[in-house]
Image (spheres, helix red, strand yellow):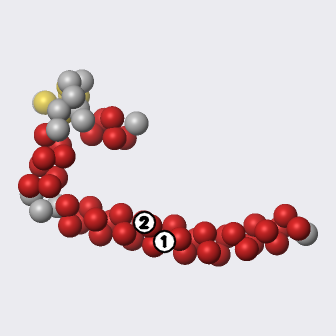
């Protein structure tokens, strides 16, 4: 859903429901892709860390 809305543009605070790649082109041409990659890396690291803690705990709860 979020990806679908990224293909639409906004004109005068209104969403124009015509697919375009302007958002993605703006993201990669402005240098913000580095921030995007860093955010994804942090999210993946936190997710893996939480899984490493939660998985054994969930198994312990299921067996108990």
- Displayed quadrant of residue 20: top left
User: Is residue 28 depicted above or below 23 in this figure?
Assistant: below
Using residue 29 as the reference point, say whether residue 16 is left or right of it.
Answer: right
Question: Which residue appears farthest toward the left when viewing the image?
Answer: 29
Within 10 Å of disc 2 (Cα), the crowding (few <14, some 14-19, many 20+) is few
**Whether residue 10 can be seen here:** no
Badge 1 element: helix
- The answer to whether mark 1 and mark 2 are in CB contact below 8 A is yes
Where residue 50 sits in the image (x, y, percent)?
Answer: 58, 71
User: Is residue 13 depicted above or below 64 in this figure?
Assistant: above
Quadrant where the image shows the N terminus: top left
Which residue matches tag 1? 46
Question: Residue at position x 29%, y 69% from top?
Answer: 38
- Between the C-alphas of marks 1 and 2, the distance is 5 Å
Question: Which residue appears farthest toward the right when viewing the image?
Answer: 64
Question: Residue at position x 65%, y 75% from top?
Answer: 53
User: Is residue 3 depicted above or below 18 in this figure?
Assistant: below
Within 10 Å of disc 1 (Cα), the crowding (few <14, some 14-19, many 20+) is few
- Displayed quadrant of residue 58: bottom right
């Amino acid at each position: 859903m979020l990806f679908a809305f990224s293909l639409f543009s906004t004109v005068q605070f209104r969403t124009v429901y015509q697919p375009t790649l302007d958002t993605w082109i703006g993201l990669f041409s402005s240098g913000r892709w580095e921030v995007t990659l860093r955010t994804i890396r942090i999210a993946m690291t936190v997710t893996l860390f939480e899984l490493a803690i939660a998985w054994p705990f969930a198994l312990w709860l299921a067996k108990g």
